[in-house]
Amino acid sequence: MRRKIVAGNWKMNGSTGLVEHLVGYVRSEVSCLDNGVEAVIIPPALYVRDVKSLAGDELSVGVQNVACWESGAYTGEVSAAMAKDCGCRYALVGHSERRQLFGETDAAVADKVAQLMSQGLNAIVCVGETLAEREAGQAEETVSAQVRKALAGVSGAEWQYVVVAYEPVWAIGTGKTATAGDAQAMHQAIRQVLKDLGAPADTMSLLYGGSVKADNAAALFAEPDIDGGLIGGASLVAQDFMSICQAMPAGTGR
Ligand code: 13P
């Protein structure tokens, strides 16, 4: 059965004040939902412990990035083991902002996935094409290659810890969302790539990200291969994040 996940990526936003305001509210509202959604808060790493202490069992917590290495002289880095030690259940890897602004390569993404697998932490592997790639008709090819390279080293029981998030780069923070139909088509293609890699693709969760808001979430989540969302800007507003969690259709998963 696929997990239905709504994850809020705060990016480099937030404060102790936001943690206190948002986490308690979301926690109590999520506990009233009966649609089986798993809400995940992914704050900057400095706030993980604060979020965790307010999250209870109702909310999951994640980090936005982990190091390629296990431990040692890597100033400024945070390891997968530390994320686990501090109570995280999830970690983003390969977000397009990391790829574009910090030169994160497919090989580095694969190394980070390996670190997370070694800790039994869930990797939310982010993939997505640029506008130029989409306009050149290369969207599916680009995304498929990213998935294959990021997950080439995953096998057996490790697949249970893999979630893929499709985030078209042109839809991030722009207010432009892929149509539900276009997003569904890409999710279907990703699921096929996962099958080709030997993954139990039908049981894996695939998230859509890129300008997901309260008013477009329901249409996206209604698609058969979209199992949840990775939310940026709207995850910083408690009521908006909750509305997106509420937009998940009820049922026991697909
Ligand atoms: P926005 O929802 O702000 O477009 O951000 C999406 C994103 O990058 C989530 O990881």
Image (cartoon, helix red, strand yellow):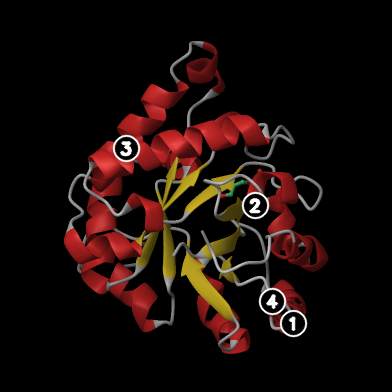
- Which sits earlier in the primary sequence, circle 4 or circle 2? 4
- Asked whether disc 4 touches disc 2, contact meaning CB atoms under 8 Å apart, the reply is no
Against 67, residue 81 (above or below) is below
Of discs 2 and 3, which sits in the foreground?
A: 3
Query: How far apart in space, not on screen, are marks 1 and 4 (Cα)?
Result: 7 Å
Residue at numbered disc 4: 34
- Asked whether disc 1 touches disc 4, contact meaning CB atoms under 8 Å apart, the reply is yes
Query: How far apart in space, not on screen, are marks 4 and 3 (Cα)?
Result: 32 Å
Residue at numbered disc 3: 193
Residue at numbered disc 2: 232
Label 1: how many Cα within 10 Å (few below 14, some 14–19, many 20+): few
Residue at numbered disc 1: 32
Query: How far apart in space, not on screen, are marks 2 and 3 (Cα)?
Result: 26 Å
Q: Specify the quadrant of the image occupied by residue 189.
A: top left
Of discs 1 and 4, which sits in the foreground?
A: 4
198 relative to 84 in the view: left or right: left
